[in-house]
Every structure is written in C-alpha cells, then in structure tokens.
Amino acid sequence: MQKYMGKGFIPALGTPLDDNGRVVEESFRKQIEDQIKAGAAGLLCMGSMGIQAFIDPAECPNIARIAVDQAAGRVPVFVGAMDCTIAGAIRRMKAMDDIDVTAFVFTTPYYSPVKRPQIIRFFTGIAKNTKHNVMAYDLPGVTQSKITYDMLKEISDTCPNFIGVKTADEQMIRKIKTWGEFPENFLTCFSGLDTFDVCYPFGFTNYLDGMVSCCPKNFEKMDKALLSGDMATASQCLTNVVKLRDAMAGHPYLLAAYTEVMHLLGYPGRFHPDYAEDEPQCREEMRRILVEIGELE
C-alpha cells in the first residue's frame, strides 16, 4: 500500500452510475486510466464530486475495488467513506476491509453542525477502529462544521494512522507545513481550485479537485508548467479550468452539467444524483468550451 505520494494533481473522480445505481465499470476504468496517463499523483474515489453521499452503500465496495484494481499500484487511491456516525463509518470501512486503499477519507458528520469535542471524538473513533489509514476532508460549506489546525493536531497525536487532510484553508496548510508539529509526511491536499497556481510555489504541491476529472489535458499541462516554473502557462491552464467550472455552475445544477461534460469526453453514465434532471440543453455550450480550452478537438 502506498502511504505517501509525490507532488502533483489529484482528481476527485466522477462516479458513473447506470439507471439502477450501479457503477458503469468501463466508463470508470477509462476515466482512471486517462487521469493516470495525464500524470495524476493520486486518485480520490467517491469524494463530493464522486457523489458518495448518493451512492447505495452496497455498491461502494465495488467502486473502490475497481479504482484500486485499475490503478494497479501506480498511484495512491483515497476512498471516501463519509457517514454521520462512528458506527456507520466503521461499517463502511469494514465492507471495504480487504481493499488495499491508501486511506479512507471522511468529512465531519454533515446532518447538523458539530463542535470541536464531537469532531475529535468522531475522527479518533473511526481511526482507532480500522487497520487502514484515515484522512480528513474539510468541507465546511457542505457539512456546516469547520475542521481546524488544533483539531487535526490532537487527532494526529492520538492516532498514528491519521495521515492527512484535504482542505481549501490556506492558513491551516501553511501552519502544518511551517510549524513543525506534524509528522514530516503528513499529507496536505489543497482544494482551493481558484488559487492552485498562486499557492503552488509556496509548497501547496498536492492539489485536489473534482474539475481535474473533466480537464485532464489542462491539468497535465499545468502540472508540467508548475514544475518548470512557467507560471504564465500554469495560470492560463487554470483560467481554462475555472472558465469551464463557472459555466457549469451557471446552470440549474452543476453536477447535471458535469454529466454532460463527462459524456462529451467519452465517459458514459450518470454523474449526478437520481433526483436531479438531466441538462442536455447545456451540451452545446459545454462542447464549445471544451474545444476552446483544448479538452476536445
């Protein structure tokens, strides 16, 4: 099992589902392969862009197993197992206990806001009940609860298998990297899409977002530019990605627009929850932008 990884981008993979809520395996495998070929440093399976909260729990192990199998040890695979209770999270992990994931990823409980002692109890309760590594996903806009530096420090001190955090909080990542209170290889995945290029030179060298899954060509080019110090090219690539993101967000439901984008890129399946309507009316706009930014010919 790969515990740590090198610099670079990490796609939050989309999860293609059929009409019965089962993963469309060929589509999922193709997406993973395209990301690895583009140079992905790791993969996040069943994150928020991967609609983990809307997937039948019985299907989650199958999705994780396909991701790990397709990656075949070439890159680390992180798997979302979010739940609102410790017991539920443990059940989710046990259902995937035989899969060689790099780490299971958890937000705070998301049904209602939770306070500091409850967040610490939640993560330590999970980490102490698995042989696998565990990672925090700081997503306060959705969960209503912010993970802080002090919380991460207390959990890390208590649980050796607590190995990192995904967050858009620049100040928290800066503290982790400069204050020297965490293990040297504690993983910080920066998810502030709009400032990937600006933050990279300051050590924010693992960056993660769902837009990576539909812009592999731009992220491949951006990653090479960042490594070589070509900030003008890196910034233009990020501008391309943000343009597509903003266009998707301008439609009634971003994830439905994302489904249209993924179809245009050759990944069949439904990438949005089943209660959301398809948005074929945005297809031509999405096609035009994908051509313009170089993701489609």
Image (spheres, rainbow, N blue to C red):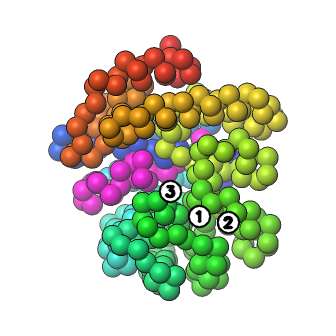
Q: Is mark 3 on a helix, strand or loop?
A: strand
Towards the viewer: 227 or 289: 289
Q: Mark 2 points at which residue?
A: 172
Q: What whole-number distance in Å separates the C-alpha atoms at marks 1 and 3?
A: 11 Å
Q: Could you tell me residue 128's position as x and y percent?
A: 49, 82
Which residue is farthest left?
Answer: 20
| Amino acid of disc 3 | Phe
Does the residue at mark 2 contact the one at mark 3 (Cβ under 8 Å)? no
Q: Which numbered disc covers residue 78?
A: 3
Please give the range of residues in magenta: 40-61
Image position of 121 (left or right of 240): left
Displayed quadrant of residue 216? top right
Q: Is the magenta stretch mostly helix, strand or loop?
A: loop
Q: What whole-number distance in Å separates the C-alpha atoms at marks 2 and 3?
A: 21 Å
Residue 80, visible in the rendered structure: yes
- 10 Å crowding of disc 2: few (<14), some (14-19), many (20+): some
Q: In which quarter of the image is the N terminus?
A: bottom right
- Which label lies toward us, 1 or 2? 2
Q: Which numbered disc covers residue 165?
A: 1
